[in-house]
Image (cartoon, rainbow, N blue to C red):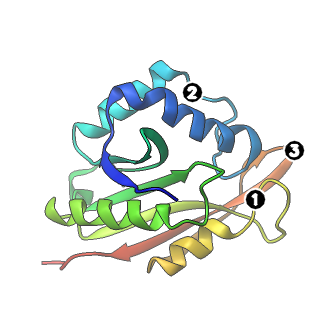
Amino acid sequence: MNAIIIRSAKPEDAAEIQRIYGYYVENTAISFEYDIPSVAEMERRITETLKEFPYLVAESEGHIVGYAYAGKFHTRAAYRYSAELSVYVDKDMRGHGLGKKLYGEIEELLKEKKIVRLYAGIAATDNEDAFLTDASLKFHNAMGYKQVARFHKCGYKFNRWYDLIYTEKEIGDCF
């Protein structure tokens, strides 16, 4: 694998981000979206996220090979020290540590913003299938996230039910 550059996303990255995300929307239950968002919608999501939170891309040879972003855990003021994270890696680049690099970088940026607790929602199933494995849960566990909730059969995709697991990680002092 060539050198990886981690940088802040820009709205003009939307098409490459859409390409990466589109695979997961169409072929997996990792995302509970049914339709791939348009490039314009991805631009909007990037722009809105960057107003308050980091949105990072991993770039190799001028092409985006993964991305991660943070957002509000909830909108009420008391949640301002918590954030929710997501990460997606190009399907052909999985297993090279890109997710770890992206999460490591975004966690440092969130610490600077005085965020103390991170959350990640992960699609889950008791029986792995062609659309969902436990790879994301294993990744988050390896990154220090602990399961705190499981919502049963709350996502319906590909004519089957999937659960949603919430994980959390403390990254700062709860002053």
Q: Tag 3: residue type?
A: Asn
Q: Secondary structure at mark 2?
A: loop
Q: Secondary structure at mark 1?
A: loop
Name above or below for residue 40 compared with residue 146.
above
Report x, y in % for residue 140. 52, 72
Q: Nearer the viewer, residue 168 or 86?
A: 86
Marking on residue 159: 3
Name above or below for residue 40 compared with residue 136.
above
For label 2, the residue is 37
Evaluate if marks 2 and 1 touch, with contact meaning CB atoms under 8 Å apart.
no
For label 1, the residue is 132
Evaluate if marks 1 and 3 touch, with contact meaning CB atoms under 8 Å apart.
no
Q: Tag 1: residue type?
A: Leu
Q: Quadrant of the C terminus?
A: bottom left
Q: How many other residues sit within 10 Å of disc 2, few (<14), some (14-19) or many (≥20)?
A: some
**First reached walking from the N terminus: tag 1 or tag 3:** 1
Name above or below for residue 2 compared with residue 63.
below
Report x, y in % for residue 91. 65, 50
Q: How many other residues sit within 10 Å of disc 3, few (<14), some (14-19) or many (≥20)?
A: few
Distance between mark 2 and mark 3 Cα atoms = 21 Å
Q: Tag 2: residue type?
A: Pro
Judge from the rendering whether residue 42 lies leftward or rightward of residue 79; answer left or right: right
Q: Nearer the viewer, residue 150 or 146?
A: 146
Is residue 81 among the parts visible in the rendering? no
Judge from the rendering whether residue 66 lies leftward or rightward of residue 171; answer left or right: right
**Residue drawn 66% across and 68% down?**
135
Report x, y in % for residue 50. 26, 38
Distance between mark 2 and mark 1 Cα atoms = 20 Å
Distance between mark 1 and mark 3 Cα atoms = 13 Å
Marking on residue 114: none
